[in-house]
């Protein structure tokens, strides 16, 4: 009799456990779309945040988002990070204003390139960058290239030598 009682008890507990697992499985199945929705929503927020940061960086550089993407891609092919490029663009803007206002170091750097701050500031920012990189590419002396890059782009300029010496052709890759 005790084996029959034990077997009956085991079957009763087995049915209860199966029912509990069935309920748990149903609950998990019902929650999965909700959890997936939260993950998708979080991913969408991250993408939007990245897009907003890209638009802000483009605005700061005076470029459209598409122009910034092109410049970032060309820079990345030479090992220049987006942050380094952003620093270079900001420094270039300051350097051109300084040259326009009479700063000898920046004006001399532009003169070595055969360029003038007023002319560059009147250009579209993308064309400005092309004109400067083409002129840097034209310098035969690597020491002069480094000095000009440092004067116009700050410390970031020394890391961007390869990028800057590709000229505007580097943007078409």
Image (cartoon, rainbow, N blue to C red):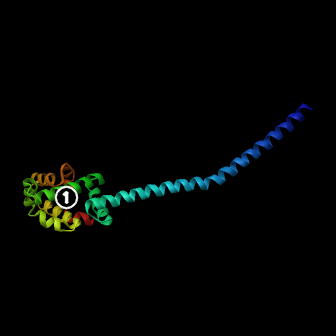
Place residue 69 in its image quadrant: bottom left
Front residue of 96 and 32: 96
- Compared to 149, does 67 lie above or below? below
Image spot of residue 105 (x, y percent): 8, 53
- Residue closest to the far right: 1
Front residue of 98 and 13: 98
Image spot of residue 5 (x, y percent): 89, 34
Residue 14 visible in the picture: yes
Q: Quadrant of the C terminus?
A: bottom left
> Residue shown at 11%/55% (left/top)?
106
Name the residue that disc number 1 marks: 93
Front residue of 74 and 91: 91
> Residue shown at 7%/54% (left/top)?
104
Place residue 10 in its image quadrant: top right
> Residue shown at 30%/61% (left/top)?
58
Image spot of residue 14 (x, y percent): 79, 41
Q: Quadrant of the N terminus?
A: top right
Image spot of residue 96 (x, y percent): 15, 59
Left or right placement of residue 85 versus residue 7 in this view:
left
Q: Secondary structure at mark 1?
A: helix
């Amino acid at each position: 009799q005790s084996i029959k009682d034990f077997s009956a008890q085991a079957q009763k507990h087995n049915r209860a456990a199966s029912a509990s697992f069935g309920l748990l499985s149903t609950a998990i199945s019902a929650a999965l779309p909700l959890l997936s929705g939260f993950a998708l929503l979080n991913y969408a927020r991250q993408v939007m945040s990245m897009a907003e940061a890209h638009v802000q960086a483009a605005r700061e550089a005076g470029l459209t988002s598409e122009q910034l993407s092109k410049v970032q891609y060309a820079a990345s092919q030479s090992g220049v990070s987006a942050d380094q490029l952003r620093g270079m663009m900001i420094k270039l803007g300051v350097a051109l204003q300084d040259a326009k206002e009479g700063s000898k170091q920046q004006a001399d750097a532009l003169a070595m390139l055969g360029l003038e701050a007023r002319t560059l500031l009147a250009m579209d920012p993308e064309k400005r960058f092309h004109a400067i990189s083409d002129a840097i590419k034209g310098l035969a002396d690597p020491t002069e290239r480094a000095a000009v890059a440092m004067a116009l782009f700050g410390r970031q300029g020394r890391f961007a030598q390869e990028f800057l010496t590709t000229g505007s052709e580097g943007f078409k890759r």
